[in-house]
Image (cartoon, rainbow, N blue to C red):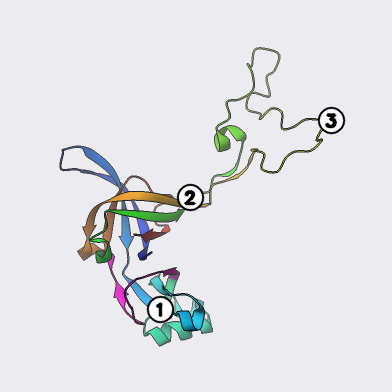
């Protein structure tokens, strides 16, 4: 699907036509430059690679410098592929205006990392028993995780404590509230995964 690479600015709220206060996320969407065009004949699939954000040349590998030079643009920090229906050429610039006719978008981001967490915070467990009945150190424990005699093992996928956050999260069907082309801003209803300043992918 067509889309852009962007950066999450933060959250705010706007008043709708009915006078209600609507929470929204502000995203800096583009401008993105076409750095590569994938074709069926050469690559086996049809797509367009977009670049977003400036990168230092000394931190860009020689092969990537060749790609950017061929596209006639400066080194870019973030790259992503999208499928566009219309034909695009190397060096073309896409702006947030491609979302003028979009009512809803999907936004892909990386959720905030929360480190090692227990089962209550990670999976919403309710805790074990009451602290007044002879137990004072097991209130937030997961309880039994399997039988002893048979099958004498813990099944794969058992919900337990572990690393939480830092995952790729897609938030679907976010309503487009406003497009501000002069500042490359896109306002969508609701929240988007990730911290302020993180890179996101916006898809129609």
Q: Residues within 10 Å of mark 3 (few under 14, many from 20)?
A: few
Q: CA distance from mark 2 to mark 3?
A: 40 Å
User: Residue 56 — which label?
Assistant: none
Q: CA distance from mark 2 to mark 1?
A: 27 Å
Residue at the disc numbered 2: 111
The reply to whether callout 3 and callout 1 are in contact (CB within 8 Å) is: no
Residue 74 appearing in the image: yes
| Image position, residue 148 (x, y; %) | 81, 30
42 relative to 104, above or below: below
Q: CA distance from mark 3 to mark 1?
A: 60 Å
User: Residue 35 — which label?
Assistant: 1
Label 1, secondary structure: give it: strand
Region of the chain picked out in magenta, as a range: 78-96
**Residue that extends furthest to the right in the rendered view of this protein:** 149
Residue at the disc numbered 3: 149
> Picture quarter containing residue 186?
bottom left
Q: Residues within 10 Å of mark 1 (few under 14, many from 20)?
A: many
Q: Residues within 10 Å of mark 2 (few under 14, many from 20)?
A: some
Q: Is residue 123 left or right of residue 50?
A: right
Q: Nearer the viewer, residue 138 or 189?
A: 189
Label 2, secondary structure: give it: loop
């Amino acid at each position: 699907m067509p889309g852009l690479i962007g950066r999450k600015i933060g959250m705010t709220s706007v008043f709708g036509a009915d006078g209600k206060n609507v929470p929204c996320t502000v995203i800096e969407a583009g401008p993105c430059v076409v750095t590569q065009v994938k074709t069926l004949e050469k690559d086996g699939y049809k797509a367009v690679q977009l670049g977003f954000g400036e990168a230092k040349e000394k931190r860009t590998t020689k092969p990537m410098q060749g790609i950017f030079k061929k596209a006639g643009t400066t080194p870019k920090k973030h790259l992503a592929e999208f499928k566009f229906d219309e034909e695009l050429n190397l060096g073309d610039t896409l702006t947030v205006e491609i979302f003028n006719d979009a009512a809803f978008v999907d936004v892909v981001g990386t959720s905030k990392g929360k480190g090692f967490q227990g089962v209550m915070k990670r999976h919403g467990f309710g805790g074990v028993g009451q602290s007044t009945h002879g137990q004072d150190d097991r209130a937030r424990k997961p309880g039994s995780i399997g039988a002893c005699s048979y099958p004498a093992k813990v099944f794969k996928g058992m919900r337990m404590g572990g690393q939480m956050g830092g995952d790729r999260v897609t938030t679907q069907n976010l309503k487009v509230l406003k497009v501000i082309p002069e500042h490359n801003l896109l306002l969508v209803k609701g929240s988007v995964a990730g911290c302020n300043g993180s890179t996101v992918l916006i898809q129609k």
